């Protein structure tokens, strides 16, 4: 009983820390970069799977390894190898760390995706100099559009508030519906760039680069990004993911345009 209480207390404490530790942004100012806020569960997401995904990992099955190749740099989702190669082959390299005093935990995941913690003052300008075009902000509070340097960049910021607890499949579908339509490269971040960001990148690996669930979870947990193991819902969201339904929602919608 005491162990269960302790676990719940740690989870509540961790969420409170994430909530109240991130309110360091300045107030709104005229002329700042506009941010689009999306309410989870109410946006025009890609939809939810009709059936819940199998919670067991099928790292060798077609669910994890069939489907699409890597993301394309034209701003849309990858829907196959344009050069006629195998679409079932695992793609992508380990994320590459980028030294930055203004953007903590900054890594390049692919040509189209970067990950980090929340940018400090001057970080948005630095991101623009790296070629980043869009930001998908997963912090519960909108930080980016209130940064002093937001008004000096042309970055497109979309705020999708997400907690590392109670993650529903519909939220994952919505996030990747948003990501598909953003101009690339995209930076995805939360507060620390560890858990919510790690979840997004893990599913990106599965969806766009044909990683197995186990491979994606291993990078999330052991990749050196600072994963907090109290947030077991992050891992459960990957285990429960209906990969084929997500592929159909994301790539099917793109192919039918």
Image (tube, rainbow, N blue to C red):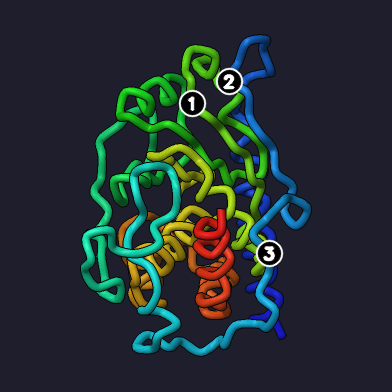
Residue 24 image label: none
Residue 33 image label: 2
Residue 23 appears at what percent x and percent y? 64, 33
Please tell me which of labels 2 and 1 falls first in the chain: 2
Please tell me which of labels 1 and 3 falls first in the chain: 3
Vertical position of residue 112 compared to residue 248: above or below: above
Residue pictured at 42% horizontal, 19% vertical? 122
Q: Which residue is mark 3?
A: 47
Residue 188 appears at what percent x and percent y? 47, 45
> In the visual, does 127 lie left or right of 119?
left
Residue 155 image label: 1
Provide the secondary structure element on which disc 2 rests.
Answer: loop
Vertical position of residue 41 compared to residue 154: above or below: below
Within 10 Å of the Cα at label 3, are there few (<14), some (14-19), or many (20+) other Cα atoms?
Answer: some
The reply to whether discs 2 and 1 touch (Cβ–Cβ < 8 Å) is yes
Vertical position of residue 246 compared to residue 35: above or below: below
| Spatial separation of the CA atoms under disc 1 and disc 3 | 27 Å
Residue pictured at 45% horizontal, 82% vertical? 63
Within 10 Å of the Cα at label 1, are there few (<14), some (14-19), or many (20+) other Cα atoms?
Answer: many
Provide the secondary structure element on which disc 3 rests.
Answer: loop
Residue 105 appears at what percent x and percent y? 36, 44
């Amino acid at each position: 009983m005491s162990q269960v209480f302790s676990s719940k207390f740690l989870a509540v404490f961790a969420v409170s820390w994430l909530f109240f530790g991130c309110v360091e942004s300045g107030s709104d100012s005229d002329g700042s970069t506009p941010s689009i806020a999306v309410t989870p569960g109410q946006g025009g997401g890609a939809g939810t799977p009709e059936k819940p995904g199998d919670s067991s990992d099928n790292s060798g099955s077609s669910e994890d390894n069939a489907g699409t190749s890597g993301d394309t740099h034209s701003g849309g989702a990858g829907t196959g190898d344009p050069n006629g190669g195998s679409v079932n082959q695992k793609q992508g390299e380990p994320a590459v760390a980028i030294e930055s005093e203004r953007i903590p935990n900054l890594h390049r995941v692919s040509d189209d995706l970067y990950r980090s913690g929340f940018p400090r003052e001057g970080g948005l300008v630095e991101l623009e100099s790296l070629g980043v075009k869009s930001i998908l902000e997963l912090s519960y509070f909108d930080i980016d559009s209130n940064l002093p340097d937001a008004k000096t960049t042309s970055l497109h910021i979309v705020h999708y508030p997400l907690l590392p607890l109670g993650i529903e499949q519909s939220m994952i579908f919505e996030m990747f519906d948003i990501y598909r339509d953003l101009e690339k490269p995209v930076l995805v971040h939360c507060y620390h760039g560890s858990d919510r960001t790690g979840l997004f990148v893990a599913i990106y690996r599965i969806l766009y680069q044909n990683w197995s669930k186990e491979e994606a979870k291993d990078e999330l947990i052991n990749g050196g990004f600072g994963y907090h193991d109290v947030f077991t819902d992050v891992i459960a969201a990957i285990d429960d993911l209906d990969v084929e339904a997500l592929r159909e929602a994301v790539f099917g919608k793109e192919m039918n345009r």
